[in-house]
């Protein structure tokens, strides 16, 4: 009896300031969503995991049903789960709402495959793996293939930036799949999106609200971010703040008009690429995927 397939820790691209030059690279659009891994053991045993291995199968019913239509015995593949807006662009706020309210709203941009029909593909080069993945994707499905973009990588990144996309991911065409951080995959962003811990909310009447943020794990203050969320997400944030009320950090007790929270609540923040010890031009996108 074949061994039951299970979640594989993902390969993590290195953040760089510009895309790599030269031959031997595959360039894809970086979609602003939740990285997701689909594990198929049988048509009745399909699970979807977050990048950290949390089982979100119940939140992705549409993707599970699409995966059931694939003509495979078993497989493990991954992609980015997104919800698109009227312009066809990924809308992260809409995705966060859909995760809680509409399990059929997501589309998966599939970009790699690690197992197929009882064969471990991780020692095969990236380009060859992607060709196998392309071969199993069905047209007009919620699971779509993440196409490589031909051309000069600087031009590709410029066009992605101008289109309001998060950036691009560049992968060595011959690279095997290895879990963990790697320089064989590189991500180039016009803005960086990271997770920070919430320290508190600064709300002064008549002014915009700010999230005061800390470096995860250390609690060190790194700056603030505009709260530019939709009404539903704002309501959820205010609820979390009330539930997690706590004392202010010692070094920040003098800040007025602030509601402080206990450590541990992670938020996704878009900010100008640069030093993570002091974020700039930051805006709050929503909760981290484990806090959604």
Image (cartoon, rainbow, N blue to C red):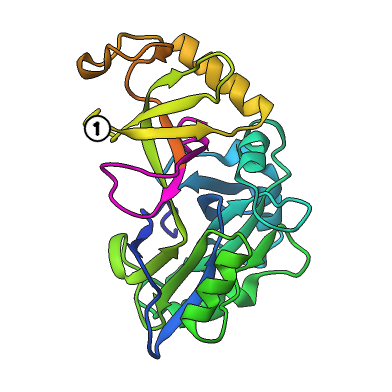
Query: Residue at image x 40%, y 25%?
Result: 265
> Furthest-front residue in view?
206
Q: Is 118 included in the stretch rendered in magenta?
A: no
Residue 41, given in percent of the width and then of the height, sits at 54, 54
Count of residue discs: 1
Disc 1, SS: loop
Give the quadrant of the N terminus: bottom left
Residue 103, given in percent of the width and then of the height, sits at 69, 39
Residue identified by numbered label 1: 217
Q: Quadrant of residue 186?
A: bottom left
Magenta-drawn segment:
270-292
Q: Is 276 included in the stretch rendered in magenta?
A: yes
Tell me if 4 is positioned left or right of 219 in this view: right
Query: Residue at image x 62%, y 20%?
Result: 235
Residue 141, given in percent of the width and then of the height, sits at 74, 61
**With respect to residue 159, does 282 lie above or below?**
above
């Amino acid at each position: 009896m074949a061994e039951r397939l299970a979640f594989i820790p993902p390969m993590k691209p290195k953040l760089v300031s510009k895309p790599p030059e030269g031959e031997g690279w595959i360039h894809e659009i970086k979609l602003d969503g939740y990285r997701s891994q689909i594990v198929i053991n049988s048509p009745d045993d399909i699970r979807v995991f977050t990048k950290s291995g949390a089982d979100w199968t119940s939140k992705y019913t549409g993707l599970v049903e699409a995966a059931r239509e694939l003509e495979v015995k078993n497989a493990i593949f991954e992609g980015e789960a997104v919800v698109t807006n009227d312009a066809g662009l990924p809308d992260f706020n809409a995705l966060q709402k859909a995760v809680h309210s509409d399990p059929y709203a997501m589309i998966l941009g599939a970009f790699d495959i690690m197992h197929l029909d009882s064969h471990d593909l991780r020692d095969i080069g990236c380009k060859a793996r992607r060709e196998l993945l392309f071969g199993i994707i069905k047209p007009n499905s919620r699971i779509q293939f993440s196409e490589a973009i031909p051309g000069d990588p600087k031009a590709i990144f410029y066009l992605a930036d101008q289109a309001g996309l998060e950036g691009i991911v560049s992968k060595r065409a011959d690279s095997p799949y290895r879990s963990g951080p790697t320089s064989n995959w590189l991500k180039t962003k016009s803005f960086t999106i990271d997770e920070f811990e919430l320290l508190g909310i600064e709300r002064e009447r008549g002014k915009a609200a700010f999230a005061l943020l800390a470096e995860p794990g250390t609690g060190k203050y790194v700056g603030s971010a505009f709260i530019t969320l939709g009404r539903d997400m704002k309501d959820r944030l205010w609820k979390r703040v009330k539930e997690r009320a706590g004392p202010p950090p010692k070094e920040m007790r003098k800040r007025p008009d602030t509601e402080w929270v206990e450590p541990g609540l992670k938020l996704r923040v878009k900010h100008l690429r640069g030093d993570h010890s002091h974020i700039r031009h930051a805006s709050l996108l929503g909760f981290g995927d484990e806090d959604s």
